[in-house]
Image (cartoon, helix red, strand yellow):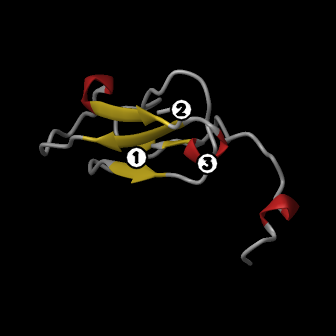
Amino acid sequence: MEGEEHRLPDAPLPTLFHYDDERPVFFGHYWLNGTPNLGGRRAACLDYSVAKGGELLAYRWSGEPILSDANIVSVSSHG
């Protein structure tokens, strides 16, 4: 519910998850921080906490089955 975000737990992203499909998938809403990287060959979190001073990320996908950090495009929230 709008305005109730503070009630959500600040939980880490599970490290035991393994995405098995051949099609790449991009997801967010995990509030990652640090240097943006994909963290996987076919599954990538693009949420680097732009609303909390982090990075706004996008991925330049050209149909490749294996994702590459080189295709990450980011803009800092600091201007």
Residue at the limit of the structure toward the right, as seen here? 7
Three-letter amino acid code at the position of disc 1: Asp
Which residue matches tag 3?
51
Name the residue: 36% across, 51% down: 25
Could you say whether the residue bearing mark 1 is in a helix, strand or loop? loop
Please give the label number shown on residue 73: none
Which residue matches tag 1?
20
Please give the label number shown on residue 78: 2
| Residues at marks 3 and 1 touching, judged by CB atoms closer than 8 Å | no
Residue at the limit of the structure toward the bottom, as seen here? 1
Could you say whether the residue bearing mark 3 is in a helix, strand or loop? helix
User: Where is 22 relative to 38, above or below?
Assistant: below
Q: Give the image quarter of residue 48.
A: top right
19 displayed left or right of 8: left
Could you say whether the residue bearing mark 2 is in a helix, strand or loop? loop
4 displayed left or right of 50: right
Q: In the depicted view, which residue is nearer to us: 44 or 52?
A: 52
